[in-house]
Image (tube, grey):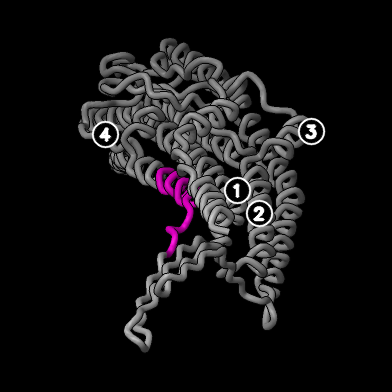
Amino acid sequence: MKHASCARRIVLALVLATLAACASQPPDHGAERAREALLARGLDASVTRKQFRGELTRPQAVQAAILFHPSVRAEYARLDIAAADVVRASELLNPSLSLSWLDVSGGSNKLTLGLAQSLAGAMLRPARERIAAADYELAVLSLAETLQELALDTESAWFAAVAAEQGLQVQARASDTALWADELGTRFDAAGNITPLQRAELARGAAEARLELLDAERQRDRARILLAQQLALPHEDWTVPASLPLPAAEDPDPDQLITHVLDTHPALQRLAWEQRRLLSVGDNTRGESWLDGAEVGVEHERSGDERETGPELTIRLPLWHRNAGTRLALAAELELLAAREATLRDQLPRQLRLHLEALSRIRAAVEIRENALLPALAQEVAARQDRVNFMLDGVFNLLASKQAELNAWRDHVTTLGEYWQQRVELARAAGRAATPAGAGLLDVSAVAPPQPGSPVPGRHEQHQHHGRHH
């Protein structure tokens, strides 16, 4: 009998030792998994440069934001918390030790020892580990989504800063044209070759040009501040290019894009993982109905020369409830996830087609300006210059044509900036993490205002006085 008792104790000790196996190591693959997900969405999130100074390209601006922005640090901390939860889910509850010492009448005593281990903690550990693993995968997806949103927001801020910088260049030339026209108006007024109304119009144009230049400078400064907030660099020794990229070679095909998005969209991937997690929670809930509070252990009792040892099992009977409310709530949450998925699959194609239509119209406006309006205005300025040279037009006619050309270039820069902002929003709706490369750069260096002294006011301005061409 003693041998049997000893065997039971040994077997039970071995069982407890097996159940109390070492806890899992915290997973450390989450950051790499997030980078792989972003690479599949078009963004290389690996930082290859730590000194971001001078002129920042678009990829460099994104890399700087990923490296320095505080939200990234916070998301990595959440990933570490999820990794710690994986370890916590793999740990068993510590066994409980009970000890009692009783004096028995007659001068003897009674000693009782008990060692118990939570049966629920052991049997439900696999389910808890599956829930924690699902939470960790959701944390990986959250990290990838944070980096993705940060990259797109940085691209948007970068495009806005470049557009503001290039728009300021064009506005400076347009303002110079108006200011030079006002200077000529002063000289003509002194010579008596201009009417008071014409002089007032030139002065008004010069004042408006100065205000427009101030507004362009304000927009440039604001765009730089917003980009600086995205970059979060510890210094201000950086600039952006002064030339916007030209539109991408082609826009995506709507049907192909929609098919790809419905297969790979991050929001749909997150919903799938949330469904897996809830199913694991449901499995755990069913087990808890029977195993909640259950313990298995061994009890040893000694009273005088008598010794008693044997196994012990404590279990709660699920008489009053079996987690029915929890199971109903889980079913409702699964239905809610299914409704969210159905909504996404219904709305995503509509949103994508809306963005693609807007993108198509903006591209058409860019092409009309580039291929029709700007060349026509350049030809008009050239023809007007010839007429001025042959004293068929006055210099103010030339300046008016030049002003119209520069204003069209300013609108062209604005429209091109809108094109890239629309590409960012399309990427966001499609679950992409980056916009495509442009097909070259917009060059405005050849669009210069007239220089003082060319054309030089001469005798042909006398036609202005006679009212032939103004």
Q: Is residue 15 above or below residue 214?
A: below
Q: Which is nearer the eye, 170 or 356?
A: 356
Residues shaded magenta:
79-96
Which label was assigned to residue 130? 1
Q: Residue at x 48, y 41 (%)?
A: 24
* Distance of label 4 from label 3 (alpha carbons): 40 Å
Report the residue marked by disc 4: 233
Q: Residues within 10 Å of mark 4 (few under 14, many from 20)?
A: some
Based on the picture, tell me whether residue 93 belongs to the magenta stretch.
yes
Q: Is residue 115 above or below residue 24?
A: below
Q: Are marks 2 and 4 in contact (CB under 8 Å)?
A: no
Q: Quadrant of residue 422?
A: top right
* Distance of label 3 from label 1 (alpha carbons): 37 Å
Say which quadrant the C terminus sits in.
Answer: top left
Q: Residues within 10 Å of mark 1 (few under 14, many from 20)?
A: many
* Distance of label 2 from label 4 (alpha carbons): 43 Å
* Distance of label 1 from label 4 (alpha carbons): 40 Å
> Which marked residue is nearer to the observer: mark 1 or mark 4?
1
Q: Quadrant of residue 446?
A: top left
Q: Is residue 328 above or below residue 437?
A: below
Q: Secondary structure at mark 1?
A: helix
Q: Amino acid at mark 4?
A: Leu
> Which marked residue is nearer to the observer: mark 2 or mark 3?
2
Q: Are marks 2 and 3 in contact (CB under 8 Å)?
A: no
* Earlier residue among tags 2 and 1: 1
Q: Amino acid at mark 3?
A: Asp
Which label was assigned to residue 255? 3
Which label was assigned to residue 280? 2
> Which marked residue is nearer to the observer: mark 4 or mark 3?
4
